[in-house]
Image (spheres, coloured by chain):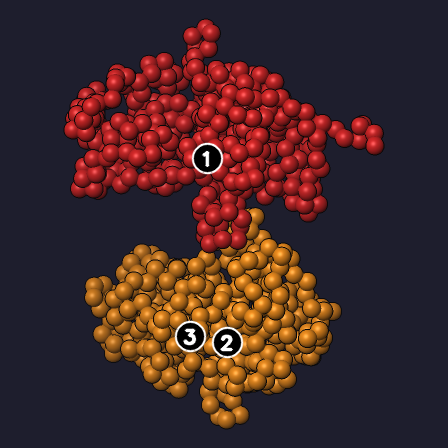
Amino acid sequence: MSPVAFPTHRAAVLYGPKDIRIEDRLVWPPQYDQVQVAVKSTGLCGSDLHYYTDGRNGDFAVQSPLVLGHEAAGVVVSVGPGVKHLVPGQRVAIEAGVMCRQCDYCRSGRYNLCKSLWFASSAKTIPHHDGTLQDRMNHPSHVLHPLPDNCSFEVAALAEPLSVLIHASRRANLQRGQRVLVFGVGSIGILACALAKSYGAAQVAAVDINQQRLNFAKSNGFASRTYCLPAVDRAKTTDEQLRRARENVQRVLADFGTPDGYDIVFECTGAESCIQMSIYAAVTGGKVMLVGMGSRNVMLPLSAAALREVDIQGSFRYANTYPTALSLLSSGKLQNVEKLVTHRLRLHETARAFDLLARGRDEQGNMVMKIMIAP
Amino acid sequence: MSDNLSFVLKKVDTVAFEQRPIPDIGSHDVLVEVKKTGICGSDVHYLVHGRIGKYVLESGKDMVLGHESSGIIAKVGQLVSHLKPGDRVAIEPGATCRTCGTCKEGRYELCPNIRFAATPPFDGTLGRYYAVPSDLVYPLPSELSLEDGAMIEPLSVAVHAVVRLGNFRTNQSIAVFGCGPVGLLCMAVAKAFGASRIIAIDIIPHRLEFAKSYAATDAFLPPPLEQGETNVKFSERAAAAMKAVLDIAEQGARGIDLVVDASGAEVSIQTGIRIVKSGGTYIQVGMGRPEVTINIDIVLSKQLIMKGSFRYGAGDYPLAISLVAQGKVDLRPLVSHRFPFQDALLAFETTRHGKGSDGKGVIKTIISGPDVKVDEL
């Protein structure tokens, strides 16, 4: 057996907390209904970061070596038997969640809730399915999406986080002319602002505890109004928590000139205090969309929501969003969205990239938003 | 058994009994031994005309007929764990691609790549065996007979029209044009959903009488068409008569919330949009002539919601089975004629003529599978 017959590629593999090793792995041919993609760009996400720093993401601990990364795009290099709609050379975005297409959720169009869903780069299912932080990836053909010609791999990789927002916006029934407030302007919050603006929101406002991020949001036109809340220690009692939440919201709404509040509040932090503030910041009859993941068990001023018919909705990943996301990204309607990519590193620097993401600031003191990894 | 005796349409008005190879099944499929099959107007249409619209049985090609079936699982694919041989099931006879946007969105009934039984070029269920994806067979609760199982298909058409697309709610009122099986089942579904009023319309008196005894609260026999009267003029007259006789109003409590046309007849469609209330919903489920004249000004000024209803989709079969299992819909009165497999052609002829040799009007004809006794329900 000649070693020339077995091509290899590199993968960034997580062996434990803060332990990423760049390995040479064999390139396996794509199986039935699979396509092999040469990954060109992977964006790093907070959930990837959790796996890197803790070896787990909430309940899901990494059980075996796992390749991270799920916000990606690349080029088809070979197709397995049975694949008719993709050809080598085709540029595609990779949808990491693979549904069964048989269960009731899949058949009724809610495949993000599929009972047998597996997600590349997640430790939720066993065996784990490797993510996109590798040179070559075999992936089911039915979740690969052709890119418009004018869409770069980096921008296409943003289709994943944008999909999260498109799904949340559909669940929120976001309409033209509404007033939208975003708590937390990391990548997800910025995309929430951009999407709301593209929908024709009458006003897009953003709140954070990080002035740099808020400046980024304002200067690039994502939000027309911003407010920086002080980062303070947690309140000691429930009453104190809620009092602060109410007062903060009053101040913010007064500053924004929208005393009635916002039709849709995208909560993109997962922080308890922000979830509480979201309820107070919504108009009577408005909606709070919980997009951020963080606190699991949260104390809510429930009557402030229920008695004002403020609906609190969750949102989990996305379904049927990739074509819309790619179309939107290549249309130019999300102005400055490419500015979200603040740092670029190579696959062999993956560990450094995660360290950078964890710090939130680079050596020059610049803020880190989205880091893109190229081969 | 190693044979797969099938009832095949060779060309217009020509059928034959043939052995066909037993289909192979994939890892997610099941092989069903078909026990009972109902005949639908569309099956008869293919026999008589060899086509429906753009679906044509090409010359030189043939096709097994039948699509309203129930049976017993004979074999399951490797990855099927929720079913086993011997299970009694109702069959949803349309395998879709699951990868197109339409399927992924949950509107799989509109999948452009659907392989629907007895729609050319795909074989139907009138054979000993039929292969189908495992999520498209539904276990029958013990309350349902195999004949009930075969009737789940047309019942699902009714569920799709009335519940899914018609958004029918408790205490609403409905008018159904056409008292064939689909019309009758639309009325049954409306009744199961707590309709305050169910109006049946047909031009054949004995069908109307049956509808009244089955599910309708009111029955209306339209006046005959007068010499030289256009369909539009007739529909004005018929609608006025209906409103007077049945005390129907344009709005409010005496308004008709939902009109379902299960006839496909131009005059029914024209009358239907006149009697539905302002802001109401009109569902077209009956298939008739493709080109129809309607008063679109009525659709406009009454802000009607007009929808087409095609077959059935996500959630319809389970709801249909549940309604029958709970006793909210009774399918038994609709089976008017039964035939053994070898008399399949006679079954089709009977359905076509609308009357059996016993003189009884046809509602639903059931053909038993090969070697299945007719009275084995």
Q: Chain A in the picture: what colour? A: red
Q: Which residue is mark 1?
A: A60
| Camera-nearest residue between B49 and B230 | B49
Q: Is residue A249 left or right of residue B368?
A: left
Label 3 chain ID: B
Say which amino acid is labelled 3: Glu
Q: Position of residue B126 (x, y in %)?
A: 61, 74
Q: Position of residue A159 (x, y in %)?
A: 50, 31
Say which amino acid is labelled 2: Leu
Q: What crowding class fits label 3: few (fewer than 14 Cα within 10 Å), some (14-19), or many (20 or more)?
A: few
* Marks 2 and 3 in Cβ contact (< 8 Å): no
| Label 3 to label 1: alpha-carbon separation | 44 Å
Is disc 3 on the same chain as disc 2? yes
Quadrant of residue A308 within the rendered picture: top left
The furthest residue to the right:
A1
Q: Chain B in the picture: what colour? A: orange
Residue at x-position 59% and y-position 82%:
B372
The furthest residue to the bottom:
B358
Front of the two marks 3 and 1:
1
Q: Which residue is mark 2?
A: B146
| Camera-nearest residue between B351 and A121 | A121
Q: Position of residue A12 (x, y in %)?
A: 59, 24
Q: Which residue is mark 3?
A: B143
Front of the two marks 1 and 2:
1
Say whether residue A141 is visible.
Answer: yes
Secondary element at tag 2: helix
